[in-house]
Image: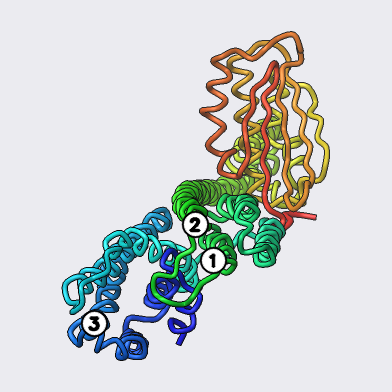
Amino acid sequence: MSCLISRQFSLDQFFLPAGIRAAALLIVPTRLWPYLLLGEYIYFATLRIPMIDTYGLDWVILASTLLMPMAMLVVHLHRRRMPSEAATGLWLLSLSICTALFVPGLNLSISYVLWSTPPPSNLLDAVDRTIFGHFAAIITLVPLAFLWSRRRTEPGWARRFVAPTVSAILVMLVLGLCMQLTSANAHTTRTHMVLLSALPAIALTFMHGWRGAAVAIPLLTLPLHGATPSTGLPSSFDLGTFATQQNMAVMSVALLALGSSISYHHQRARSRSLAEETTLRLARSSHQTSERELRARAAHLKHLGEGMDSSLGEMVGWLKSQGHHAVANSLLHAASVHSRLFREQASLVYPTGLEQVGLYVTLQAGGACEIWNNTHRVTHPRLMGNPCLLTVDLQLAIYRSLIEAVSLLLELETGQLCLRTRSGQAGNRRGIVAVVSLLDRGTTLSTRTTQQAVERLAGRVLAYGGSVHCRGNRLRLVLHESITHASPAAA
């Protein structure tokens, strides 16, 4: 029925039934193709049975029964190798070209061989026009049909492009309506409207790749075809719009090729982004596993330290009971000093206090602070913000990074060091910025220090979506996390 109706509006230069045939083969599952074949035979029976006396029974049978199987064969061979996201546009071009060549080519060959009356003198002259008409209709409808057939498997359209997409479609619809209202002889005006419609079509292609081209091509082509007068009879042709339709066919090919290229590069960028996210997630998981192992080791060391303190306490008590107070006091003093040093070293293995009191208290009272004070080169840290709103994993990452950064500058640079941090929130992310700098602003970090900082700090910092920057006399660390995936570590 659709072919019968569309034939009344078709021209040799834009043969809609050919596009409907190819589009239906893409939309309808293969198991239902026999029903399409039956409908095609009914369509041809309605048209060609009255032509038996003129062109012969052989032509009516062969030219009516072989066209749909040929189209099915072309579509089936293409569907056997469904395209990737990157090659969809080229796949659609191949399908359109092959269908436009083989189906009308078969029809014209049968007509030339089997017509009982001599073929008209312009039959061979009309071959290129007929093939072009099939191609113009197929490339208009097939991309949109393919997009519809993959609607359940395609990824969602980018939400940030909703307003521009709707605006571009509305502009094309308005221009198409204006095209219908122009005079049939106003070819120049319609050509200008087509050129204006090409701008939002290109915008759709840039925003959505081949999907945008699949939507834009029908909006670009069908209004011009609707504004072109047609007799509904074979050999219906309008010379005034033929050149414009040729240009639009070339434009359709260009849009699909451009859309395919854009989709290819978008897929590559998306795959690279997913690979980076996977790598960072694995790196974070590796760091978290290492921290859990260090936490267990620190807990074991704490247990050993408590056991040694208990044994030494018992020894001191026994010495005092035996009257050896001087020895007991000396042993108690030595034990307290070594116990404090032991706890400081154990806190460097894993800062257990960070889980209870947060990052800043751990930096000011832990073993790292004692080591920095002993160097007499690190000034009192300036710590701002509330790091307890960050997750323990992120606080651990910045804790390890700060210790490594300060150790690096103490090792490779001279002079006093200054440590500043600020934690806070920006948008839907929480994070912390830490700056370890030379107190002398006139001194710059050496090239070796910069290289070592990137090599030794980037692995942990990048795993948390952060960055390492070396500029002038300072080393800047940034780590952040999404609020939706973050749970506060401590109040």
Distance between mark 1 and mark 3 Cα atoms: 30 Å
Image quarter in which the N terminus is found: bottom left
* Viewer can see residue 465: yes
Q: Which residue is mark 3?
A: 55
In the displayed structure, does residue 203 sit left or right of residue 381?
left
Amino acid carrying label 3: it is Tyr
Is any part of residue 272 visible from this angle?
no
Look at label 2 and name its amino acid: Gln
| Label 2 residue SS | helix
The answer to whether residue 422 is left or right of residue 112 is right
Q: Which residue is mark 2?
A: 245
On the image, the x and y values in percent for residue 215 come to 55, 63
Residue 3 x %, y %: 43, 81
| Residue mark closest to the camera, 1 vs 3 | 3
Q: Mark 3 and 2 residues: CB-CB less than 8 Å, in contact?
A: no
Query: Is mark 1 in CB contact (under 8 Å) with mark 3?
Result: no
Residue in the foreground of this view, choosing between 341 and 417: 417
Q: Are marks 2 and 1 in contact (CB under 8 Å)?
A: yes
Q: Is tag 2's residue or tag 1's residue first in the polypeptide sequence?
A: 1
Q: Which residue is mark 1?
A: 225
Q: Is residue 285 above or below residue 96?
A: above
The three-letter code of the residue at mark 1 reads: His
N-term mark: 3 or 2: 3
Numbered disc 1: secondary structure = helix
Say which of 403 and 15 sits in front. 15
**266 or 170: nearer the eye?**
170
